[in-house]
Amino acid sequence: MKNNKLLLAYYGDDFTGSTDALEFLTLAGVKTVLFLRKPTQKDLDRFPEIQAIGLAGKSRSMSPSEMEIELFPAFENLKSFQPAHFHYKVCSTFDSASHVGNIGKAIEIGSEVFNQKTVLVSPSAPHLGRFCVFGNLFARMGTIGNGEIFRLDRHPSMSKHPVTPALEGDLTIHLAKQTKKSINLVNLTTIEKGSEKVLEKVANNKAEILFFDGFNLEHLKTIGSVFNELASEKTLFSVGSSGIEMALGLDWKDKKVIGNEIAFESAGEVSPILVLSGSCSPVTSSQIEYAMQNGFLEIALESKAVAIQNQAEIIKSTVAQIVDNFNQGKSTILHTSKGSNDSRIAETELFFKSKGFSANEIQKQCSSIYGSVLGQITKEVVKTVKIKRILFAGGDTSSYAASELDILALEMIAPIAPGAPLCKAVSDNEWVNGIEMNFKGGQVGTADYFIKVLKGEKL
C-alpha cells in the first residue's frame, strides 16, 4: 500500500452482497471490516492493521431520488479515507431497474464524486457461476453445485424476481435503460489478449461507461491488473460483483502486495439458531423445507404485518413464540413467504393496492416494511434469550432487518458458502456484540444450507 492508503473501500447495495465482498477480500488475506454505518477514523482505529473497508447499504431497494440522498454522503465518507480503489458492489445478477436500485444512477453519482469520466463495470463472478460473454450475463441456478446455467433473461428465478425481474440478458442494453451515459464494452476477444491490449482499449475508449467481459479466473486476473494500473495515481471508481474483489486479489497476490490466502477452521455447531427469511426464491424455499424435515420449526409471518396498526401485536406474539421455541432448544425459521407462489405475496400486494400504491412502489414497501418488522422481532428476541447465531436470507429485507440491531461492523470468522460467510457482529450493545451472523441472498446455497449454518460447516 502506498502512503498507508487503504487498498480498497466499497459500498454494498445490500447486506448480503456486502458480506460477499467481505469474504473474498478476507480469504485473499486482506484485513477487511464491513461497517453498517458510515465509519469515522476512530471506528477504523478499533481494528489494527486494517487494509480494506466496506459499508453495507440498502440502495438496491431505493428509488433514484432516495439513492441520491443515501449515496452522495456515503461515497464522500469512504472517499475521505483515500483508498486506492472504490467499488460500488452490486448483486452478481445485476439486480436493478430504472425505478429501484438504479445502477445507472449510482454510476452517475460515483462519476461526480470521484471526478471520473469513464466508470469501469465488471459484472462477472465465475466463482459464483456468473459469466459475462459479449455483454450478456449468464447465471447458474444457485451459486454452488452443478446447477444449470441460463442467460439472465431466461433464468427460472431471476427472470421472475419480484422486485427487479431480469428482462434483458445484455447488460449494456439493460443499463442503457437506467442512464443516458454512453456505454461501451471490452469483450472477450480483447480480454483474451491480456492486460496490455485491454489498457490500449481503455485508453482509446470515448464512452462514459465501460463494461468488461469475463468467463474465468484468468480473465479476472487480467481485469484486476488493468484496474490496479489505472488506480496508481488516484482512487479508481468501479462497479460490479464481488468478482472485482476477486480480480484485484489475484493481481495483488501476483505482485506480492498481499501474502498468502487465509485458512479458517470450522466455526463449529451452535444450536438453536434463528433464521429470518424475506426471500421469495425457490432456492430458499427448498432450504426452508429441508430444514423443517431436519428439526427446525417455522413461523409464517402474517401478511397483515405490513399494516402498522397490526405490527405491535404481531411482533409481541412472534417474539414470544420464538423465545418459547428457543427455550425448548428448537431452531426456528421466521419467513415472509415460501416461494413465489405463496398466498401472502398476493395478500400483501392487494393491501398496498387498496392504499393506492403502484406496482413499483409496492415492491419497495415490501422490502422495507417486512425487513423492519423482522429486525424489530430479532431485537426483542436477543434481549430475552441468548442467541449465538442468526441467519438472514434475502438481500432486500436483510438490509432493513440488520439495520434494527445497532451493529457497528462485521468481521468474517468462517466460510459457509461462496459469497455468504459467517461473520461476528461488533456493537457497543452487549446483547448483540459477538453474535455470529450469516447473510445469504435468495439464490445462495444448497438445500441443506440452514443445517450447514447451524453446524458451522462449509458447503
Image (tube, rainbow, N blue to C red):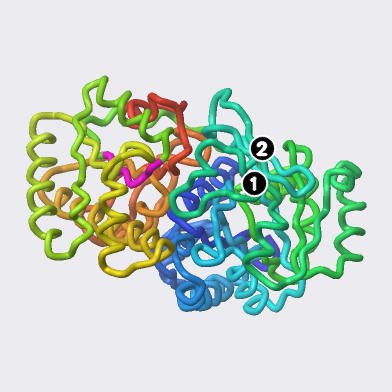
Is 312 positioned to the left or the right of 101 in the image? left
The magenta stretch spans residue 15: no
Query: Which residue in the protein does label 1 denote?
Result: 243
Few, some or many residues within 10 Å of mark 2 (<14, 14–19, 20+): many
Which residue corresponds to the image point at 44% horizontal and 72% vertical from the top-left?
Answer: 40
In the rendered image of this protein, does residue 117 appear above or below residue 273? below
Q: Position of residue 218 (x, y in %)?
A: 78, 38
As shown in the figure, which amino acid type bears the numbered disc 2?
Pro
Q: Position of residue 401 (x, y in %)?
A: 30, 55
Q: Which residue is mark 2?
A: 126
Mark positioned earlier in the residue sequence (2 or 1): 2
Q: Dividing the picture into quarters, in which one does residue 269 lie? A: top left
Q: Is residue 227 above or below residue 216?
A: below
Q: Secondary structure at mark 2?
A: helix
Which residue is at a point 9% across and 41% down the rendered structure image?
A: 321
Q: Are marks 2 and 1 in contact (CB under 8 Å)?
A: yes
Residue 90: x and y in percent read 56, 55
Point out residue 258 in the picture as x, y percentages from the top left corner: 66, 47
Q: From the viewer's perspective, is 98 left or right of 194? A: left
Q: Nearer the viewer, residue 438 or 120?
A: 120
Evaluate whether residue 89 shows in this view.
Answer: yes
* Residue positioned 43% across, 61% down in the render: 35
C-alpha span from label 2 to label 1: 8 Å
The residue range painted magenta reads: 275-280
